Amino acid sequence: MEKQPNALIEETSPYLLQHAFNPVKWVPWGEEAFEKAKSEDKLVLISVGYAACHWCHVMEHESFEDEAVAELMNKHFICIKVDREERPDVDQIYMSAVQLMTQRGGWPLNCFTLPDGRPVFGGTYFPKEQWLHVLRSLEHTYKNDRSRTLEYAEALHEGIVQSDLVREAAENVTFSREKLHEMVLRWSRNFDRMEGGGTRAPKFPLPNNIDFLMAYAFLNEDRMVLKHVELTLDKMAMGGIYDQIGGGFARYSVDMLWKVPHFEKMLYDNGQLLYTYAQGYKLFSKNEYKRVVYQTVNWLERELLSPDGGLYAALDADSEGEEGKFYCWTEAELDKVLDADDHWAKKYYSVDQHGYWEESHSNILLRRVEDKEFCRSEGFTELEFEEKRGRLIQKLLDERSHRVRPALDSKKLTSWNAMAVKGLCASFEAFGEENFLQLARKVIRRIERDCITQENLVYRSVDEKGRKINGFLEDYVHTAEAMVCMYTVTSDAAFFFKAEKLVERALELFGDPESRMCFYTEQNSGLIARKMELNDNVIPAANSVMANLLFDIGMLNGNTSYIERSKQMLANMYEGMEHYGSGYSNWGILLMKNTFPLLQMVFSGDEAKTALKAQLRQYHPNAQLALANGAEIALIKDKTGEKGVFYLCVDGTCSLPVTEVLEFEKLIRKERNLSYS
């Protein structure tokens, strides 16, 4: 019998379409679903996941494709499917509910609510028999103990409303470097000294954590933290979490060794990690980091770039129904590709018992050893080995191209694309590779063309049917941040002014006049609560991105109201930051901007572009670099001239201009007061 589609067949989200032929009568998120629940007096199931989520697939296969389970769900519940990447606002609300109920969260997220959307029960993945028990118990309780259900929903709703809200700091806060030192000291107790990252599995690449620790270590000349950052970057790049053949990082490693990944590849991870590895290269000058950047950009172009210049969201973990099948090799498969000149390859890529994905399997995850040590042991020069490895990688890529590919999540999400633009700009700074800048231009043009209106309203996504989802705070601030990055590398002031307009619009739509923070959603979002995203995670909190933006734009254009608001936002978060450094890393970056000298470098005249590019290649945390080209931006507008001159301004006060590059660099070293700058 031919399967009949449910209401999701009209959607364009790959995740929703994955469920379009389930026997469950799924409906998309919207008012109609809740109106139906009210008219039929049924509880609502809100089931949230994303296309590349392995356990979402497992629960679908076990429960949502099962006729008996579907019959029970259809009879007693209105069942809503949500793509968390399209609707992070919905996910945020019901994830908060599940975390309040169970003290844990994750995906798939399954939350049961009253017909008005207030939650009453929830969890993540449920095995089939447990799921059946949950369905029967909830249906019975709702029918037979309605008052208890309503009472619980009311209390839980109040908890959701109050969670993540911030009040304005009552007194003036004095920012101190001691807060940063305490923050890092406590955090360092959980550094993995052997493998980098933290001391717990699973291990996530947390780019903003690394960015903060890198800047902190540099500005404080903290050798221990610097060593930890380098170790983390090294081990991630050598591990199975990194696709040694095709480039790009998987979402996380299930173990402490960065060995076995959860194989989905997400745009937001890789866009941010481009930035992190480009900065790492500026500081450590390691060719391994350069290769990570080049390979990852090639992967973006090859596998995620759409014809219109946007970047798709993700690649699935599974292919042919098996997790990681596309990326793993048997020794026999490798032997077919390797020839006599590749005798080194198995040792380099750990093709031995240490490379097995599972002890009972012959599948091997390619991980690599450290380059310099390997070249020394094998008698290769680094240049010779680079050529050998390049040839082998191309052969393995060609062989892998014949496999069934993981499914593509073809959504193009504005904030994720903007993160990639930031990463591409940093990559261009570090290497001067024009292709990186051209790709950044393609992506930002597509955002401007398709996702920003003339009134500076931002869409989170625009699907192939022309349907638009309004942007959230995240989309506005990451897009504005990408515009500032584009201004830095191109000196085109139009990007800067666009960033200003987006920030101004975001403050109108999301700003809270009482706390001076920002809500994640607009006023009339139709949700049961308005949340503030405060803690930095795999993606930094939208509020911390906004606070950094306000500071950066304010310092560039002399906007004191922006700077004051940024400081107020930081003051609101200041108390207790030291207790959970990894959750406040982007706030920590802002704290450094307020406690260390902010260097503003302005380049004017004949040699300006060359000098600017040279300084962009160097590692300059807590710095702003700009070309004086006559644009009406406060920092640069009075600093033009025909002769090549360079200005160094510190915290808004500028020194006399100098005409020699070496003299300018001496000024920078003096202001930094660092032994290794």
Image: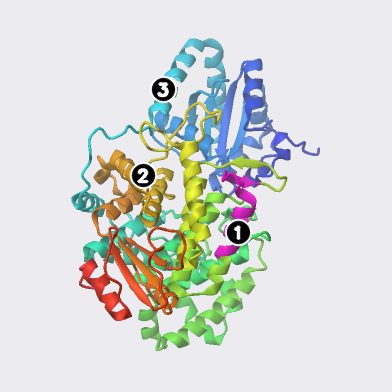
Q: Nearer the viewer, mark 1 or mark 2?
A: 2
Q: Residue furthest left?
A: 178
Q: What x and y, as percent, mark residue 101? A: 41, 28
Assign a secondary structure to mark 1. helix
Kindly identify the residue that appears in the image at 53 percent across and 35 percent down.
Answer: 90
Please tell me whether residue 458 belongs to the stretch shown in magenta: yes
- From the viewer's side, name the closer residue of 77 and 158: 158
Left or right of residue 412, residue 666 in this image: left
Q: What x and y, as percent, mark residue 207? A: 40, 57
Q: Nearer the viewer, mark 3 or mark 1?
A: 1
Task: Calculate the distance from the C-alpha at mark 3 to the C-alpha at mark 1.
Answer: 42 Å
Q: What x and y, as percent, mark residue 431? A: 46, 74
- Residue 158: image tag: 3
Assign a secondary structure to mark 3. helix
Dot 1 amino acid type: Arg
Q: Quadrant of the N terminus?
A: top right
Dot 2 amino acid type: Ser
Region rendered in magenta: 440-462
- Residue 561: image tag: 2
What residue does disc 1 label? 445
Is 76 rendered above or below residue 424?
above
Dot 3 amino acid type: Glu
Asked whether the beta carbons under mark 3 and mark 1 sit within 8 Å of each other, the answer is no
